[in-house]
Every structure is written in structure tokens, then in C-alpha cells.
């Protein structure tokens, strides 16, 4: 809802304010500025400008999560319609592998990282659980807001999607590197298992 | 170059034809229609329409690769400025792990799959090598053409970027599943290695 947007809130309670109303609303908000800088993120070849990033932020809303809260649950098929940009704090991403009682930490994410951008796009069940390991301050973009941005500012929406793709690509590269490492590790272990025991 | 676009080629040799000239040029081309259908791809929540997909195809060019050709080399930092949509044929994606002489097959991709979309966005070195294991017929989108599409048709560019993000996300989900499997496997192997040998 508009009343939860970054910065000053206009008198109007319209649910779908015009782009310039949105931008005026975030003028002077430090956390909106921080969110814009973080959205620009890692080196893309067709980068969001700071002005475009501010436009995106004007479609987001601030969100606070208390330490210890698990706010995304692995396998969940509901509430997949948002992504979160971490502004402050730390989130642990865990998976529960069937044969084990203890969850396995896949990664720990800090300021500038996105969470849930895959579910935002495909609505598939969440692939991992996310828990705030500190108090977290973030910015949420809902699927509905992304749809509005696409209608109002298609060029900015396109550059946002490039920035999101790039972040998913960075994670895929990291994951591919881990898979290469595991391939080597299991081969080495298999050799050890196959070795005849020295009597 | 425009002369290599799908379908009929206009008399003009302009390097940057207008969007409607591009669309007229692919009218009636069966492979352009196939490319458009494949671009739409897996279930996205904000899907490219068939007309939008045809617009994208009008910015692509057909490309044939002979069986046995390695057309992307792991670690390559040049020629990262395109992605390929496979229309026909099969491509093997391999990685060369340092300690081994034999490459390891990461995946085999067929019609409808994208190759090189990460490099298109970030220009980072290629993370794997790609070899055509059959003759391959594909459609190439260069970074330059993506830039033109963004200028000419920003809304379509935004929906294309969503489709690309979704495909990267699908691969990341697959990769996460493999990592979960490897985590279990190495734990089981570690137990076997740690077991006291029965004498």
C-alpha cells in the first residue's frame, strides 16, 4: 500500500499514484537513496542510472524483519510475489535436505543482495528458507508494483530486469563453481574409498 | 549485419532499420516463427506475447554451427557480446576442471534453450565451453541489437529480459538441486571413509 512507501507520504491515499507523485514522495529520504545506490549494484553493461534506480525505489516499500524471523520457507507456494533488497542486516539462506535433521546453510546474504527475485518472476515454490540473523531493513518490490513500473516506465523496467538477471547470473556462476569443486571432491573421495586397505 | 536477418531482406542496406521494416522482413519466415515461439518459452508470469516475441526475433539473426565446432571457450573474455537461442540441434556444455585432463559435461542443451545470456549481460569470461554435438541452427541476439531493441521497443525489451531472467533462474534452481544432492553424497562418502575397516 502506498502509505508504506519510502520517505514522505502524499496526502492522497491513491493506490496507484502517478510516477512523478511517487518520485516526489521519496525526495530527501536517505534510505530511498541508499536503496537506489544498492539497486545499481554490480557492474552491468547496460546499467541503471541513479535517476532510473530512484524511479524503481519509488515503486518499492520499506520492510523491517526482526532478528530470528524466518520470512521465506522452503517449498512455500504462497507469498512468492515479492523480492527483497537487503539495505541493512544479514540473512541466512538454508535448505532442509530430506535425510538430515539439521538444515544446511547455502549462503549468507548482506546489504545490496536480493532475495526472492526468482519467485517474483516464476511463482515457483521457494527453493530455500531465509532467516534474518540480525534485524533486517529492506526494500520490497511486489509483482504488482513491477507490473505498474512496466506500464509506467518500460525502459526503466527493462534496465531493472537486466540488473536482476545479472544478479541471478552471478549466483549461477557461484553455484557452477561450487559444483566444479564438489565434482573434484567426490572423485577424490571415491578414489579413497576404492583404495585397497593396507593390512 | 542486416543482410543476415531472418526471412526476406529489404533492398535497403541500412544497418539500423526501423522496427516496422524489421518486422516486414521476417514476415512469412518459418524459422522466425519458430524462434518467436521458442523465445516465449517456459511459463513466466509476465509472458512475452507472440507479437512481442516476433519483434525480438526481428532483431536477431540466424546462425548455423557445424557439428563438432566448439563455439564458446571456457575462460574466453572476447566475443561475450551475444546469446544464442537453439532452434535445432544439440549443444554440450563442458568445463575443464584443473586437476583432470578430461572435460566434465555440465549439461546438454537442445531446442528452445539459451546459451551465453550471462556473458551478454555482464561481459564476464565464459564459465564453460559449448560444442555443437550435431549441426545446430540457432538465432543470435547481439548486445548491440539488444541495445537497439531497448531504445526502439522498451516494453518488449523489458519482457524479453523477464524471459531471460526466468531461464537463468531455472538453471539456478537446477544447480541448487544438484548442490543439495552433492552435499548428501559427500556426507555419505565421508561416513564410509571414516568407518573403521572390518578386519
Image (cartoon, coloured by chain):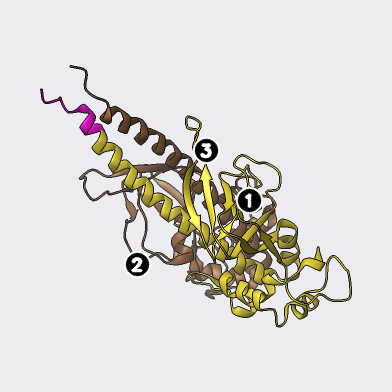
Chain colours: A yellow, B brown
Question: Gap between marks 1 and 3, in whole Å?
Answer: 17 Å
In the foreground, A113 or B110: A113
Residue with the mark numbered 1: A69
Q: Is residue B131 left or right of residue B54?
A: left
For disc 2, the marked residue is B78
Q: Mark 1: few, some, or many residues within 10 Å (few <14, many ≥20)?
A: some
> In the figure, residue A183 lies in which quadrant?
top left
What SS does tag 1 mark? Answer: loop
What secondary structure is marked by label 3?
loop
Protein chain holding label 2: B
Q: Is residue B88 left or right of residue A64?
A: left
Judge the density around disc 2: few (<14), some (14-19), many (≥20) Cα neighbours within 10 Å. Answer: few
Residue at image x 43%, y 42%?
B179
Q: Residue at x 88, y 76 (%)?
A: A11
Name the residue that disc number 3 marks.
Answer: A96
- Near mark 3 (Cα within 10 A), the count class, few <14, some 14-19 or many ≥20, is some
Residue A198 colored in magenta in the image: yes
Q: Where does the image place residue B157, in percent across and percent down from the top left?
A: 62, 64
Residue B180: tell me if it is visible. Answer: yes
Amino acid at each position: 500500500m502506498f502509505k508504506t512507501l519510502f520517505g514522505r507520504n502524499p496526502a492522497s491515499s491513491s493506490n496507484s499514484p502517478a510516477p512523478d507523485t511517487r518520485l516526489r514522495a521519496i525526495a530527501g529520504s536517505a534510505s530511498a537513496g541508499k536503496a537506489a545506490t544498492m539497486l545499481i549494484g554490480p557492474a552491468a553493461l547496460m546499467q541503471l542510472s541513479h535517476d532510473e534506480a530512484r524511479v524503481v525505489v519509488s515503486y518499492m516499500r520499506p520492510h523491517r524483519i526482526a532478528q530470528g524471523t524466518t520470512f521465506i520457507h522452503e517449498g512455500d507456494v504462497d507469498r512468492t510475489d515479492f523480492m527483497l533488497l537487503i539495505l541493512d542486516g544479514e540473512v541466512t539462506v538454508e535448505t532442509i535436505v530430506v535425510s538430515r535433521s539439521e538444515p544446511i546453510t547455502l549462503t549468507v546474504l548482506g546489504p545490496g543482495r536480493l532475495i526472492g527475485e526468482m519467485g517474483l518472476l516464476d511463482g515457483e515454490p521457494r527453493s530455500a528458507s531465509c532467516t534474518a540473523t540480525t534485524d533486517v531493513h529492506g526494500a520490497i518490490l511486489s509483482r504488482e508494483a513491477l507490473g505498474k513500473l512496466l506500464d509506467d516506465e518500460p525502459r526503466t523496467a527493462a534496465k531493472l530486469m537486466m540488473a536482476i538477471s545479472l544478479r541471478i547470473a552471478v549466483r549461477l556462476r557461484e553455484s557452477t563453481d561450487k559444483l566444479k569443486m564438489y565434482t573434484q571432491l567426490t572423485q577424490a573421495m571415491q578414489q579413497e574409498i576404492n583404495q585397497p586397505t593396507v593390512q
